[in-house]
Amino acid sequence: MKLLYIHQHYEETQGATRSYELSKRFLENGAEVVMVSGQGDSHVTKEGIIVKSTHTAYNQKMSKLRRILAFIHFSLKSILIGIREKNIDKIYVTSTPLTVGLVGLILSKWKRKPFIFEVRDVWPDVPIALGFIRNRVVIRLLKWLEIQIYKSATHIVVLSEGMRQNLLQKNIPVSKVTIAENFANQRLVKESKEMPLKDVLLANWMKGKFVVVHPGTMGLVNGVHYVIACAEKLRHNDSIHFLLIGEGSEKQKMQAEIKKRQLTNIRILDAKPKKETLQIASRCQMGTMLIKNERILWDNSANKFFDFLACGLPVVLNYQGWQKRALEESGAGKGFAHADVDAYCSYVQHLAANQQSWEQAHQASKQLAENYDVDKIANRVWRVITNRRNVPGETLY
């Protein structure tokens, strides 16, 4: 089988590596994978993934207009690459943005081949709810386009139960939607932990401290300013530190605010390759997920949540939803109402002061990680691609 895999933000070593890990396992199952990426150069990975780049400039600091132009650039060039690619059997398209789904729809019609649409964030619902899109005509157009993409897709893969419910409410048949969450790659964590920590100053800053880590984007949607309020509240508890790793539109503002408040218990690092991020995270004591106070964001399935589980870290959230339920049912962490900074900080202090409670949450986190094992999730997606979704003894949604 020759699979055309379209992912604008495909990465092999930085942050989100879902498509890379899935592709490796598709290759192990005998597939040929041609990855259309927006960034980097065209090349063949050591595993045999053929990467073809559209050379689309994109980063989180771009203006709204420049991002829209980047989406259009990628869409047009990826359609051309797809048209030129011979002997394609199936097309696998992963969002965001929604325009990537349009690429899959067009190529599916042109090539007369089925395409599977993977929904990582439910667009346009998220940008509409956050106020990024307000024009009524544009909203109607995007909602119409969303439904056309769903109807044209052979199957739809979503990353959480909340996303599945969102699609079902839009009258997408239940048989057409499968949940395949992000994954906890424990083998990658093990490899990362074997690497020595390069940053001596960071190692000294972390030594003997209870470090709460937040790797990932620092944008408006991520609501990372919340952690400054927590650091301020806990500034007199010298045993607790907060560490952020990544880039984003809010990073400079946060650095200025930390300096203004003279907080020494919080530090921000630049984005790191995946292994180096895991290397640092695995030496921390707790992971945190923070988002802006919007209900639509509760359904997210961010990589860092699963990375925390792979590292065996207890997790604390400032929101509700399926992740809160998973953590609290397993004992691997807790979620709090966005406004309840006091409860959030009290939980962090409790685990920092109580070794037995931390150890219980640590073991629960490692056990929960097994539910999201990379091979298990990849196999579920592969069965979607090969039309073998119904397996005796397992229920797939």
Image: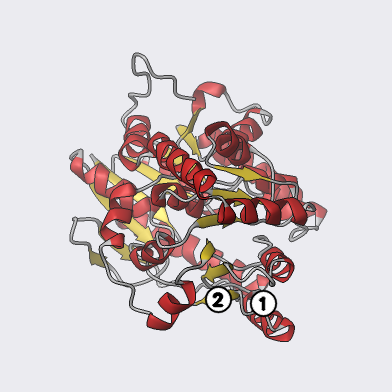
Is 26 drawn above or below residue 176 in the view shown? below
Question: Is residue 139 left or right of 180 when viewed as pictured?
Answer: right
Task: Give the SS element for disc 1.
Answer: helix
Is 123 drawn above or below residue 279 in the view shown? above
* Residue at (39, 68) in percent of width and height: 54
- Inspect the image, locate mark 1, and give the three-letter code of the amino acid beneath it: Met
- Inspect the image, locate mark 2, and give the three-letter code of the amino acid beneath it: Ile
* Residue at (33, 73) in percent of width and height: 197
- In the foreground, 20 or 229: 229
Task: Give the SS element for disc 2.
Answer: strand
Disc 2 target residue: 268
Q: Which mark is residue 61?
A: none
Q: Tell me the quarter of the image containing the N terminus.
A: top left
| Image position, residue 72 (x, y; %) | 55, 64
Disc 1 target residue: 254
- In the foreground, 300 or 331: 331
In which image quadrant can residue 250 be found?
bottom right
Pointers 1 and 2 in contact (C-beta within 8 Å): yes
Marks 1 and 2 sit apart, C-alpha to C-alpha, by 9 Å
Query: Does the rendering let one see residue 97?
Result: no
| Image position, residue 11 (x, y; %) | 38, 62
| Image position, residue 27 (x, y; %) | 21, 45
